[in-house]
C-alpha cells in the first residue's frame, strides 16, 4: 500500500531563515512519481514539482530545492531565505501509475508559518 | 497547464439538501478527478470522472452519495447528496492534460459548510 508521512505538523520560522520540510514515502512499485503541492490560505492547491523514481538528481528552482533519496525513501523540500508569502500548508504526494491510472496519495501536510 | 475553474467557490447548505459543484477546464483533458479535504485534513480521492461512462469510485465513496457526471473532455460535476455536517469540506477537482500525463493540476476548490 502507498503511504506518505509528513511528520512535521507545523513549523514556525522567522523571515529569511531556511526551512526544510520532510517527506517519507512507502511503496512497492519500482516506478512512481513524487510531488510537492502548496496550499495557501485561499485553499487552491498549487503544483510545485514532480520527480520520477528514476531521477535522483536534486533540483533547485529559485529559493526552492528538493532532495530525493531513494535509499531512505525521502523527498525533502527546502525553502531558502523564507518569506511571509511562503506561509501555507505544503503537501507531499506519491503518484501510482500502475494499471494506467494516476492516483495520488497525499501526506497529512506541514503548516509553515513565516513571521516577520 | 490548463486553467481550471470551479463553481460555486463556497456555499452554506442545510442538512438533507444536495449541492452540485461544477469543474470547467479551458482545454480538453484526458483525466479528471474529485477530491475531498475535510477541515484540517489531507486530500482524499473520491472518484475518477470518466468521459461518457460511470465514474470510478474509491473505497468508502458511493455513487448514490456522490454522483458524478463528465459529459465531455472539459467539464465535470460532483453532487453531494443528502448532506450532513460531516460533509463540510473543501471539494477539489483536478485534471491531467495530454502534455503532462503524470501531473495533476487542481482547481481552486469549493468550500462547503453544512449546517
Image (tube, coloured by chain):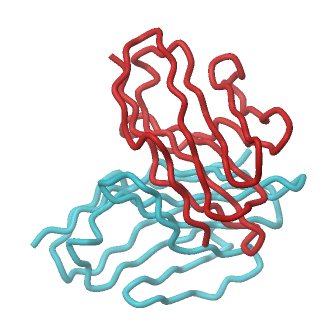
Observer-nearest of A21 and A45: A45
> Residue most toward the left?
A116
Q: Look at 73% across and 62% down and name the residue there.
A: B28
Where residue A23 sits: x, y (%)? 51, 63
Quarter of the C terminus of chain A within the rendering:
bottom left
Q: What is the quadrant of residue B113 in the picture?
A: top left
Residue A8 falls left or right of residue B33: left
Where residue B43 sits: x, y (%)? 52, 44
Q: What is the quadrant of residue A35 in the picture?
A: bottom right
Observer-nearest of B90 and A56: B90
Quarter of the N terminus of chain A within the rendering:
top right
Where residue A6 sits: x, y (%)? 47, 55
Rendered shade, chain B: red
Observer-nearest of A10 and B61: B61
In the depicted structure, whether residue B70 falls above or below residue A105? above
The chain whose colour is cyan is A
Amino acid at each position: 500500500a502507498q503511504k506518505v508521512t509528513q511528520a512535521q505538523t507545523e513549523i514556525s520560522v522567522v523571515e529569511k531563515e531556511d526551512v526544510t520540510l520532510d517527506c517519507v514515502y512507502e511503496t512497492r512499485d519500482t516506478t512512481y512519481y513524487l510531488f510537492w503541492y502548496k496550499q495557501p490560505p485561499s485553499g487552491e492547491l498549487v503544483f510545485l514539482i514532480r520527480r520520477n523514481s528514476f531521477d535522483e538528481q536534486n533540483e533547485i528552482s529559485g529559493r526552492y530545492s528538493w532532495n530525493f533519496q531513494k535509499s531512505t525513501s525521502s523527498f525533502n523540500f527546502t525553502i531558502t531565505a523564507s518569506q511571509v508569502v511562503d506561509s501555507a500548508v505544503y503537501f507531499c504526494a506519491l503518484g501510482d501509475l500502475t494499471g494506467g491510472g494516476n492516483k495520488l496519495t497525499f501526506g497529512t501536510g506541514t503548516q509553515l508559518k513565516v513571521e516577520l | 497547464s490548463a486553467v481550471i475553474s470551479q463553481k460555486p467557490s463556497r456555499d452554506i447548505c442545510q442538512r438533507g439538501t444536495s449541492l452540485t459543484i461544477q469543474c470547467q477546464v479551458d482545454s480538453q483533458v484526458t483525466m479528471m478527478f474529485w477530491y475531498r479535504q475535510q477541515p484540517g485534513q489531507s486530500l482524499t480521492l473520491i472518484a475518477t470522472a470518466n468521459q461518457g461512462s460511470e465514474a470510478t469510485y474509491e473505497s468508502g465513496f458511493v455513487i448514490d452519495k456522490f454522483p458524478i457526471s463528465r459529459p465531455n473532455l472539459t467539464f465535470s460535476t460532483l453532487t453531494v447528496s443528502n448532506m450532513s455536517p460531516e460533509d463540510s469540506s473543501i471539494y477539489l477537482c483536478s485534471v491531467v492534460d495530454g502534455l503532462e500525463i503524470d501531473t495533476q493540476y487542481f482547481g481552486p476548490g469549493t468550500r462547503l459548510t453544512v449546517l
